[in-house]
Amino acid sequence: MLAEGDTDEPCPVWMDWFTPVRLAAFKGNTQLIAGHTAQARATLLAVLDNLPADDGKQRTIILGDLAAVEAAAGKPEEACRWANETLDQLSMTWYAVGMDRIRDVRKRLHAWRNEPWVRNLDDRMYGWGTTVSALQR
C-alpha cells in the first residue's frame, strides 16, 4: 500500500507523515533497541542524509538516536558529539521528544561521567541556554 499504484484504495490523509525516510528512521531505532549498533548507525546516517532540511523535529530524533548508537557501542566521546549536535538542533527547533532522547543518552554515559566531554555535555544540557530555549517554545 505504501508504493504508489499498489492499490485502488485512496491513501488516508494522515499516511503522508510516513514517508520512506521516516519509516527508515523507525527501522534505525528498532535496530538500536535490538542491539544491532552497526546496522542502526548505517540506517540512521542514511536517514540523516535523506531527511528534508525543513524537518527539524525529526532531525533531533535521528541525531539523538545516533548519540544512543555510539553510547551503546561504547564510544562515549562520539556519543557526546552527536548529543551536542542534537542540542544545536534543539536550539533551533525545540522538541521535547528530542530532549528526552538526549537525557536517555546521558544515562548511558554514566560510567564516563568524569570525562571532560561528558561534563561539557552536562553543562550544556543543564545550562541556562538550554533552559531558556525550552521555555521559549
Image (tube, rainbow, N blue to C red):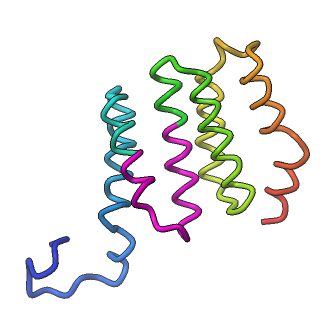
Residue drawn at (64%, 30%), measured in percent from left and top? Answer: 80
Is the magenta region chiefly helix, strand or loop? helix
Q: Where is residue 40 in the image (x, y as percent from the top left)?
A: 36, 37
Q: In this view, does 92 lie to the left or right of 23?
A: right
Marker count (numbered): 0
Picture layout, residue 124 above or below residue 132:
above
Residue drawn at (15%, 72%), measured in percent from left and top? Answer: 1
Q: In this view, does 74 lie to the left or right of 126?
A: left
Residue 57: within the magenta? yes
Which residue is at the far front?
49
Magenta residues, start to end? 45-66
Q: Position of residue 35 (x, y in %)?
A: 35, 26
Which residue occupies the foreground of this view, 41 or 64? 41
Picture layout, residue 131 above or below residue 30:
below
Picture layout, residue 105 above or below residue 19:
above
In which quarter of the view is residue 77 placed? top right
Q: Position of residue 129 (x, y in %)?
A: 87, 49
